[in-house]
């Protein structure tokens, strides 16, 4: 039998009073119990909100990280497993590279969280992490028959508008975000893989939005290059309009869909496998019950491919002091590669040459995982 807070407190107060306790004392106990109930209810509500899956990862395969105090536990467990012969070692008795990826990942997450906090933008960024299981059939660097879980980090900005409508030049206020990403990547091992994902809102033709999101991803990567990234493999991903972070059809709400997201993994194959599992969340579906009401009865084509580009930007920034006349975000193809004009938050323009290697990734069907 369920008893309400007020009913229970009155019941207890009446019983205490009938047992000889004064009415004033009984009412004090009633008031105290009422406050306890209120606090308990608040804590339960907070726990529900804290543990509820956010729209940033609707399939629930990644977990949001709020803070990482220390990576010592992961290191201690790794050393313990080594002492017990439970890890793979090389001929020199050192850990095989894949054995230390979880420890490196912990350091990566902690470094990014700290950098975001120090830059005063911790409230703008969400960090989500998880693992992808890969085998030697996908990753040739693994021993024959070996299968391992490797970490992946997804960095999301759920309330930031990265681009103006139809633009692929990052807005000035998002440059601190790009600086945090760039600074962190430069502290990574050389084998790190960074994926910059471009997105658009739903307005405009589908092909146009895919091309626009590709340009946004390229310009975002070029901007990070301007900020000093000089290591790792870099890729762009064009999702177009198919993965909105807000499924509303209101123009006031959809600005956050004009965005960049970032995936960081120890090797590219891990991120590509994660990307292959992304199911388009079209504006006619919605991520939450409150959003479904916005959605009209629309039919959209089935998405089967996601364009991915491997981009080499090593040493490609032109350092001479030239005043470039092209508009920021302009893309020019020539014999040297694809040039992207980047204008930073201070208005300085630079040209980044992108050597683009184009690929397409087939999305897994519902029965494939």
Image (tube, grey):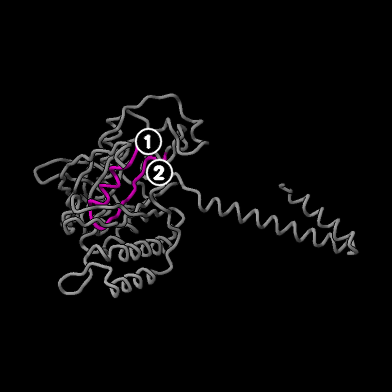
Residue 238 image offset from top left, x and y in percent: 27, 40
First reached walking from the N terminus: tag 2 or tag 1: 2
Neighbourhood count class around disc 1 (C-alpha, 10 Å): few under 14, some 14–19, many 20 upward: many
Check if residue 328 falls in the magenta segment.
no
Span colored in magenta: 255-279
Question: What's the residue at 60%, 51% (across, down)?
Answer: 45
Residue 353 image offset from top left, x and y in percent: 17, 49
Q: CA distance from mark 2 to mark 1?
A: 21 Å
Residue at which label 1 appears: 201
The secondary structure type at the circle numbered 1 is loop
From the image, state whether disc 2 or disc 1 is nearer to you. Answer: 2
Name the residue furthest left.
335
Image quadrant assignment for residue 230: bottom left
Front in this rendered view, residue 229 or 99: 99
Check if residue 267 falls in the magenta segment.
yes
Q: Is residue 151 above or below residue 91?
A: above
Residue at which label 2 appears: 59
Front in this rendered view, residue 328 or 239: 239
Question: What's the residue at 74%, 48% (across, down)?
Answer: 4
Residue 159 image offset from top left, x and y in percent: 44, 46
Question: What's the residue at 30%, 73% (across, down)?
Answer: 84
Residue 20 image offset from top left, x and y in percent: 91, 64
């Amino acid at each position: 039998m369920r008893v309400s807070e007020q009913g229970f407190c009155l019941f207890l107060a009446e019983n205490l009073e009938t047992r000889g306790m004064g009415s004033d004392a009984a009412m004090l106990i009633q008031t105290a119990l009422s406050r306890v109930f209120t606090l308990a209810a608040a804590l339960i509500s907070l726990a529900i909100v804290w543990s509820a899956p956010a729209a940033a990862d609707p399939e629930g395969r990644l977990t949001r990280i709020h803070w990482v105090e220390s990576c010592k536990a992961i290191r201690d467990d790794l050393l313990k497993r080594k002492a017990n012969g439970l890890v793979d070692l090389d001929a020199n008795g050192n850990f095989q590279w894949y054995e230390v990826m979880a420890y490196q990942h912990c350091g990566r997450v902690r470094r990014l969280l700290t950098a975001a906090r120090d830059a005063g933008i911790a409230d703008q960024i969400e960090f989500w992490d998880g693992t992808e299981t890969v085998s030697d059939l996908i990753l040739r660097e693994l021993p024959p028959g070996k299968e391992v879980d490797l970490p992946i980090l997804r960095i999301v900005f759920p309330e930031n508008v990265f681009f103006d409508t139809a633009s692929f030049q990052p807005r000035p206020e998002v440059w601190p975000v790009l600086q945090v990403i760039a600074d962190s990547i430069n502290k990574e091992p050389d084998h790190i893989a960074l994926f910059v994902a471009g997105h658009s809102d739903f307005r405009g033709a589908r092909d146009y939005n895919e091309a626009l999101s590709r340009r946004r991803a390229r310009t975002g990567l070029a901007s990070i290059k301007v900020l000093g990234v000089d290591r790792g493999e870099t890729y762009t991903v064009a999702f177009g309009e198919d993965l909105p972070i807000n499924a509303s059809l209101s123009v006031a709400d959809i600005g956050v869909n004009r965005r960049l997201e970032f995936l960081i993994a120890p090797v590219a194959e891990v991120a590509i496998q994660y990307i292959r599992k992304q199911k388009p969340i079209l504006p006619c579906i919605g991520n939450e019950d409150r959003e479904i009401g916005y959605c009209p009865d629309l039919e959209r084509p089935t998405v089967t491919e996601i364009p991915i580009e491997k981009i080499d930007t090593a040493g490609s920034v032109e350092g001479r002091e030239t005043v470039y006349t092209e508009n920021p975000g302009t893309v020019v193809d020539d014999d040297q590669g694809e040039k992207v004009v980047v204008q930073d938050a201070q208005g300085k323009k630079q040209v980044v040459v992108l050597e683009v290697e184009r690929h397409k990734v087939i999305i897994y069907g519902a029965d494939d995982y």
